Image: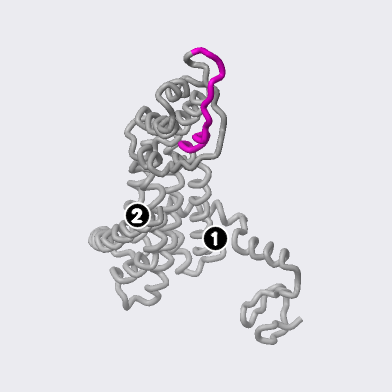
Amino acid sequence: MTCQNCGTEMVGAWCHACGQKRMDLRTSFLHLLAEFGRETFEVDGRVPRTLFALVVKPGALTEAFMAGRRASFTPPFRLYLACSLMWLSVASVLSVAQDWSGEAIAGVELHVSRDGEGPGDFRFDLISSDVDAEGVADEVDEAESFENARQAVLHLRTSWMEATEAEAYAASDQWQLVEARMASNWEANQGTHSGTWWLARVVPGSTILTLPWLAGLLWFVHGPRRAGGAIEGLLAALHLNAYGFVVFSVFFAAMKLPDPLGEVLQIAGLVSLPVHLYVLMWRVWDRGWWGTLWRWLLLGVLYLLVFFIVVALHIVYGTLLG
């Protein structure tokens, strides 16, 4: 069989002249999709070796790829993609987004009627009603305690009732069930509006947007005239961000662990990021401890300046959409 790209006679699955892999595109879409999945997310013996080097030996992967030892490790872009998807999966599984607007409005459309002669003998039936729960959702989001959130939801549910009817509803089994559900959601989402939750949700997305800036800075601070410096900077940035996604995944998971274990893991993960960057720069560019230190400081200042601008824009954009 001849190579479809250059016409050279092929021996095996790869063309020795141009490097193109033999592949028949005249096949089913599902087959092509499966092939893409294997090429992109292929798991083999390189994965544990790559992850070990990524976490334990900062800069070793970049150094190996620049030295031509590429077959032993997972390619940088594939590693970056896999780690980012791991973080997204962890964030999706562990986040319990509470829709307070829905919580407040569920069952609000009640018809109150007498079901006996006693002072508490009221019957609550669902009917159609136009009730806007956005206001109470904002109140609950800003509530400093569960009691404040509970009162906000209860007020919306009873604001259209007579005083006696509202009192009876507050003592009804239906409200007790809703209150119990709210309490469970509140406890499960204590970190939703906290700084740690913000850190776990906003920061990883901002690192993706600032990846080109990080790669450019690594190239710049180590000498723009260095041969292969731009590629070296890009590889280092990809490996550093891949490590960052591993840290963010652990950070996010640690939010669900009891203290002090959760706090220790979170702090250790955040502290490891600048240390990882320093060791990576020292290993890859070999400028000595002091030469690496001032470049590390300069890069940190320039990167964080742009990074926090991106974070601010990220928050503003999310606020406008929300």
Image coords of residue 205 (percent x, y): 41, 56
Q: Which residues are magenta?
A: 103-118
Q: Earlier in the sequence, mark 1 or mark 2?
A: 1
Identify residue for label 2. 315
Task: Categorize mark 2 by other alpha carbons within 10 Å: few (<14), some (14-19), many (20+).
Answer: some
Identify residue for label 1. 74
Residue 24 lies in the magenta stretch: no
Q: Which structural element holds mark 1?
A: loop
Distance between the Cα atoms at labels 1 and 2? 34 Å
The image quarter containing residue 1 is bottom right
Q: Residue at x 26, y 61 (%)?
A: 305
Type of the residue with mark 1? Thr
The image quarter containing residue 243 is bottom left
Q: Residue at x 49, y 40 (%)?
A: 102
Q: Residue at x 49, y 34 (%)?
A: 108
In front: 275, or 83?
83
Residue 282 in view (yes/no) = no
